[in-house]
Image: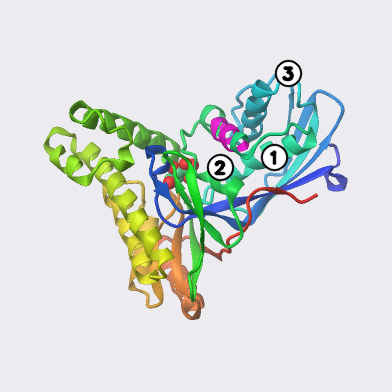
Amino acid sequence: MSNHKDFEAEVLIQSPGRINLIGEHLDYNGGQVLPAAINLKVKLHFRKNNSSTCNCYSKNFDAHFQFDINKVEVSEQEWHNYFLGVVHFICQAYPGKIQGFDCVVESDLPIGSGVSSSAALECGVAKGLDTLFSIGLTDDEIITMARDAEHHYVGTKCGIMDQFAVVRGKKGKLIRLDCNDLSFQYVPADLGPYSIVLLNTNVSHNLATSEYNLRRQECENGLKSVQNKYPEQTILAQVPVDIIQELKSSLPPKTYNRLLYVVQENNRTITASDALQAGDLITFGQKLFESHDGLSNLYEVSCKELDFLVEVAKEFDGVIGARMMGGGFGGCTINLVHKDSEEAFIAACSEAYFKEFNIQLSPFTVAIGDGVKQAI
Ligand code: GLA
């Protein structure tokens, strides 16, 4: 491992980031989501080293760390935990299968920008170790182990959407996923003359993890209040809107807003997905704008930079839909932009954003790609 430049890999894994068209903060509430894997990815090179030492090197950070396979515990360095967490859960389920290995990782996914570089890394580590040591993990095991690593080692109590999309993504397809029972359907990403443009705000507010976990808690508490009167309601996303409205006066105002957002977003995602499948792109885009309103005003996971970019998009001819994407508090907006207007839109947003915040915007156009896979 002393010279990672000449590193000869036995196994190379490519693990993509993900986008989500609509259905935000619904995965941990048993709702509908519409994600896809993208063409930007993390590449992980692995080889066995016939010892009990594991070496991990990140090209992006130019940093290396080491641990013993028999002593896996949470680290204070966040990026270490993506490896440690996955190794921990594989060893727990399949003791003795993993031995010492070397891994070099490089990524063209922007970190902290809402395209789930973390799930890409976790699923990539799981897939790589599975392949290197012939463990025989199923896709479902990779998805849940990566999610458990995020919960218990990284500390975000995320849902299942990111890992699901990273593992099950398919070129040219969106995944219409029901997070209640994990049933899903591939939907052609037929966007006609529109491209998917991501605008990375290049801000990542440090509230992201604590507020994320707080939203999850608020939703769990809110559901309990609903169940006091309607015990048969066990899935928050499926509670009828009129029940939430009826309970308004008995709920703290913020809890009411969170619950209202969840049930409205779930309905919106169903309407939007149906519209997309029927070829009605205008309705589909409109639902993205509405989703942003809810995320910003009711769920309160947006920030001024994201709101600003969505406002610019709304005013721009050729943009049929835009909203913040992912956990929030920074990261990207996702925009559906007519191909003829793409360049002008990116230029206008970059200029306006810089003028307002003195921050350079990072725009990128994404294509929908395959899920995690072995390249060699
Ligand atoms: C993050 C989480 C996901 C999901 C989204 C919001 O990406 O990892 O599980 O909750 O936020 O939709």
Question: SS of the residue at dot 2?
Answer: helix
Residue 58 at x, y percent in the picture? 71, 42
269 or 222: nearer the eye?
A: 269
Residue 139 or 261: which is nearer the viewer?
139
Name the amino acid, label 3.
Answer: Asn
Quadrant, the N terminus: top right
Badge 1 marks a residue whose secondary structure is helix
Count of all numbered marks drawn on residues in the image: 3
Residue that mark 2 sits on: 163
Q: Position of residue 173 (x, y in %)?
A: 55, 59
Q: Tell me, yes or no, whether the highlighted magenta stretch contains residue 96.
A: no
Residue 122 in view, yes or no: yes
Q: Which residues are magenta?
A: 142-149
Asked if residue 202 lies left or right of residue 300, the reply is: right
Which secondary structure, mark 3? loop
Residue that carries the numbered disc 3 in the rendered image: 70
Mark 3 or 1, nearer chain start = 3
The amino acid sitting under disc 1 is Lys
Could you say which disc has been placed on residue 127 in the image? 1
Colour scheme employed for the rendering of this structure: rainbow
Q: Residue at x 33, y 65 (%)?
A: 286
Residue farthest along the bottom direction in this orientation: 340
Question: Of tags 2 and 3, which is closer to the observer?
Answer: 2
Amino acid found under the numbered disc labelled 2: Gln
Determine the residue positioned at 66% across, 27% down. Answer: 90
Q: Residue at x 72, y 34 (%)?
A: 136
